[in-house]
Amino acid sequence: MDETTPPPPPNEASPPPPPPITTSGSPTDFLKGVVGKRVIVRLTSGVDYRGVLSCLDGYMNIALEQTEEHVNGTLTNRYGDAFVRGNNVLYISAAEAL
Amino acid sequence: MLIFSVFKTLTDQRVTVELKNDLCITGVLKSVDQFLNIRLDAIKVLDEARHPHMMAIKNCFIRGSVVRYVQLPAEHVDTQLLEDATRREAANQAKR
Amino acid sequence: MDPSSTGIQEPFDLIRLSLSERVYVKLRGDREVTGILHAYDGHMNLILSDVEETIMIVDVDAPLEERRAVKMAKRKMEMLFVRGDGVILVSPPSRT
């Protein structure tokens, strides 16, 4: 090709935006950040709970609102509020931007 | 501690303990400890045909961790007292 | 500042607010119970009255995708202690 100069990187003057909080910080920071947000809680049994994370404690006991229970992809139950005992929790995943 | 206290008030009552292996044992609650280990006297196994090896046993010690349920005599449980005690314990826990 | 609209600060608040209410409890081993909650502790040991237990009996021969409860065994118990280590989820009656 005759064009040799690569296009200049856009807005060289401004520094790159700070990385989103999801990629930095401790697990505790993550957990603080997801309180009040939509999350997916996966249990070791493979069952998922999708809902708004009300709060959690050091044992990973979890209180959820507007909770949907999903068993291998299909909706199996709805709960207004739900308390999940921490020992069953495999992970908590953010289901919306933090 | 609260649940331990409840069981202590039920000593000498008949209870039915259901274990995690589905074995159901009815007997007189002789004692309980902080782990909710349970000693039962004058026991009877519900499904004796399925558990013939239990027939000769008159009393037993049950490790708390293998218990699934304990059916309690409702007439000896003061539910109002329980709820008040539970709220009190929850308040104490929050203070810590 | 409340983290949520309901104003609960820790998960156990959800349970405390359910005392003397009917709750749904999902347990290990494909079991569910509903009953009126009278006591709990930090292990999620529970004491419930007017209890109905449902045991889902799953057909293990069915293909994995359609392994729904094929049979439901139900039974009632007047007053029941549920050991906390079997508890997966507790849901209070909806407060809407």
Image: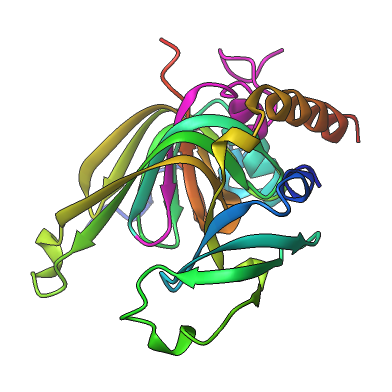
Residue lying at 65% horizontally and 68% vertically, measured from the top left: B40
Q: Give the camera-side residue of A24 and A14.
A: A24
Image height check: is C78 above or below C3?
Answer: below
Residue B37 in the magenta stretch? The answer is no
The image shows a total of numbered marks equal to: 0
Coordinates of residue A37 in the picture (x, y in percent): 50, 28
Coordinates of residue B7 in the picture (x, y in percent): 72, 49
Residue C16 in the magenta stretch? The answer is yes
Q: Which residues are magenta?
A: C1-29
- Residue B11 falls left or right of residue B13: right
Q: Residue furthest top?
A: C96
- Residue B50 falls left or right of residue C12: left
Quarter of the figure with residue C52: top left
Residue lying at 39% horizontally and 82% vertically, measured from the top left: B51
Residue lying at 51% horizontally and 51% vertically, measured from the top left: C87
Q: Give the camera-side residue of B15 and A60.
A: B15
Coordinates of residue B82 in the picture (x, y in percent): 70, 30
Quarter of the figure with residue B23: bottom left
Q: Give the camera-side residue of C71 and C14.
A: C71
Image height check: is C3 above or below C15?
Answer: above
Is residue C93 something one can see in this rendering?
yes
